[in-house]
Amino acid sequence: MKKAIDLSQYGIVYIGYPIWHSKAPRIMYTFIESQEWGWTQIIPFCTSSETDIGDSAILLKNLGHGGEWKEGKRFAENATKSDVETWISSL
Ligand SMILES: Cc1cc2nc3c(=O)[nH]c(=O)nc-3n(C[C@H](O)[C@H](O)[C@H](O)COP(=O)(O)O)c2cc1C
């Protein structure tokens, strides 16, 4: 089946999502599971009221086919694009 998104040309992919009930939304798990990640670096980040990224990122990683998962980051729910850009620049 042809994938809607071909990620094979990317070296690093940032996966951003809101926390719902302490996890990533189900569609994120479906997306992660649908790809062959190979050696792509995957850097997760989330927004939430208070829940840290921990469990959601571990569950995503466990479902993924390959990929080099890096430590992720949680942002407050009112985080701005600039907050995320500043973090990415610091990596
Ligand atoms: C259905 C639902 C469940 C949520 N569950 C949590 C949660 O378990 N922990 C938490 O800290 N925030 C929770 N939140 C708050 C969201 O993470 C927060 O509103 C979101 O990250 C903001 O991003 P958005 O503006 O893109 O929705 C929940 C929000 C919704 C709508």
Image (tube, rainbow, N blue to C red):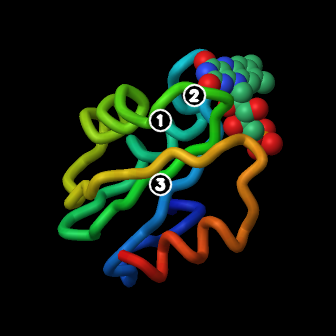
Residue 57 image position (x, y, % from top left): 37, 38
* Structural distance between the alpha carbons of marks 3 and 1: 18 Å
Residues at badges 1 and 2 in contact (C-beta under 8 Å)? yes
Residue 54 image position (x, y, % from top left): 36, 32
Q: Which amino acid type is marked by label 1?
A: Tyr
In front of the other: label 2 or label 3?
Answer: 2
In front of the other: label 3 or label 1?
Answer: 1
Label 3 CA crowd tier, 10 Å (few <14, some 14–19, many 20+): few
Tell me which residue sits at (30%, 44%) in the image.
Answer: 64
Label 1 CA crowd tier, 10 Å (few <14, some 14–19, many 20+): some
Tell me which residue sits at (63%, 43%) in the image.
Answer: 47
Give the vertical position of 76 relative to 45 (above or below).
above
> Residue 76 lies in what quarter of the image?
top right
> Residue 28 lies in what quarter of the image?
top right
Disc number for residue 26 = 2
As rendered, which of 21 and 38 lies closer to the eye?
21
* Structural distance between the alpha carbons of marks 1 and 2: 5 Å
Residue 10 image position (x, y, % from top left): 39, 80
Residues at badges 3 and 1 in contact (C-beta under 8 Å)? no
Residues at badges 2 and 3 in contact (C-beta under 8 Å)? no
Judging from the image, what secondary structure is the residue with disc 3 in? loop
Query: Is 36 on the left or on the right of 76, as rendered?
Result: left
Q: Which amino acid type is marked by label 2?
A: Arg
Q: Earlier in the sequence, mark 3 or mark 1?
A: 3
Task: Kindly identify which residue carries mark 3.
Answer: 1
Task: Kindly identify which residue carries mark 1.
Answer: 29
Tell me which residue sits at (28%, 67%) in the image.
Answer: 41
Ligand 1 in which quarter: top right
**Observer able to see residue 20:** no
Residue 80 image position (x, y, % from top left): 75, 62
